[in-house]
Image (spheres, rainbow, N blue to C red):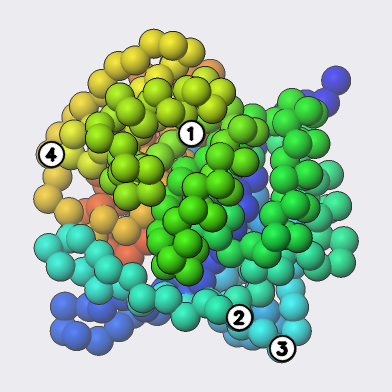
Amino acid sequence: MVERNGLLCIGECMMELARRHDGSFGLAFGGDTFNTAVYAARMGMKSAYATALGDDPYSDGIIALAEAEQVDPSLIARQPGVMPGLYLIETNRGERTFYYWREHSPARNLFELEGAAEKIEAFMRRTAFVYFSGITLSIYSAAGLDLFESALRTAKQAGARIAFDSNYRLRGWRGDADRARSTFKRFLALCDIALPSLDDEQDLWGDKDVAATLARLSALGVLEVVVKSAADGAFILDRGDVAHIPTPEQVTPVDTTAAGDSFNAAYLARRAENAAVRDAVHTAHKLAAIVIRHPGAIAPREATLALAAKIPSL
């Protein structure tokens, strides 16, 4: 029998420029699924990341960060002569606006690079959880999506659990919401767990409330759903049972970047140790509350140590 453990996150990690209080910008690295990989590792979960980077110093910096955070970088492909994408964050009262320069990001070609799809698929077969987002789907070509779907099907058949956060950004789909919807439906059909945010679902699907989101995802065959609703907490669908899990405290955010990414990380880490869905959500709320008290996607390690210490090693 194959022994399964750990989490594989798939997507894009970029250079991050975040404006400081004095108007200057600080350089860091981040990306929705990369952030989740980092926070899952901090929560004690064996974590790996799959993407493509260049051969420049900034790509070296991303690899170094992954290694420092104990995220396995063995599935990060390197392409000569290219650089990772860049995003800039502007914040206003804790809420953020993103600006992207990523049209030629090497991450877009991951599954079409020689040998990459086969290597990732082989890794997936031994992984407990595979996680990706709507942003992941938005960067791949039609051929890349076909290869990704094939790898996911193989992983699912081998016993991996597939988790997805819609993380819908219209700009990433070049304004084509219909293509986003059809692509999401295609990949949700493979998912065991959905971790969307209510505002994203409303933007893409026009859901009038949480009940509409839960009903739609359930109809697609997703048995475990957690809908994040900012200060209203989270709403869960667990094999037919629906419940509301409020946030344990109200926090005035410094920066909401990676709030959902960290929530997802803590949730998957707890579910990997067979914690109940409700308990996993409680821990996820706590980690997200810590993260939004700090600027940028990756909060200082010392900020998350106390919570991580309460999670058994996975």
Q: Which residue sits at x=86%, y=52%?
A: 118
Question: Which numbered mark, 2 or 4, is in the foreground of this view?
Answer: 2
Residue 195 vertical placement versus 223 (above, below): below
Q: Which residue is mark 2?
A: 104
Question: Which numbered mark, 1 or 4, is in the foreground of this view?
Answer: 1
Q: Which residue is mark 4?
A: 250
Q: Which mark is residue 81?
A: 3
Tell which circle, 2 or 3, labels the residue nearer the N-terminal end.
3
Q: Which residue is mark 1?
A: 194
Could you say where residue 206 lies in the image, as x and y percent from the top left?
Answer: 32, 42
Few, some or many residues within 10 Å of mark 4 (<14, 14–19, 20+)? few
Q: Nearer the viewer, residue 215 or 222?
A: 215
Q: Which residue sits at x=26%, y=23%?
A: 245
Residue 262 vertical placement versus 65 (above, below): above
Amino acid of disc 1: Ala
Residue 288 in view in this figure: no
Residue 33 vertical placement versus 211 (above, below): below
Q: Which residue sits at x=80%, y=28%?
A: 158
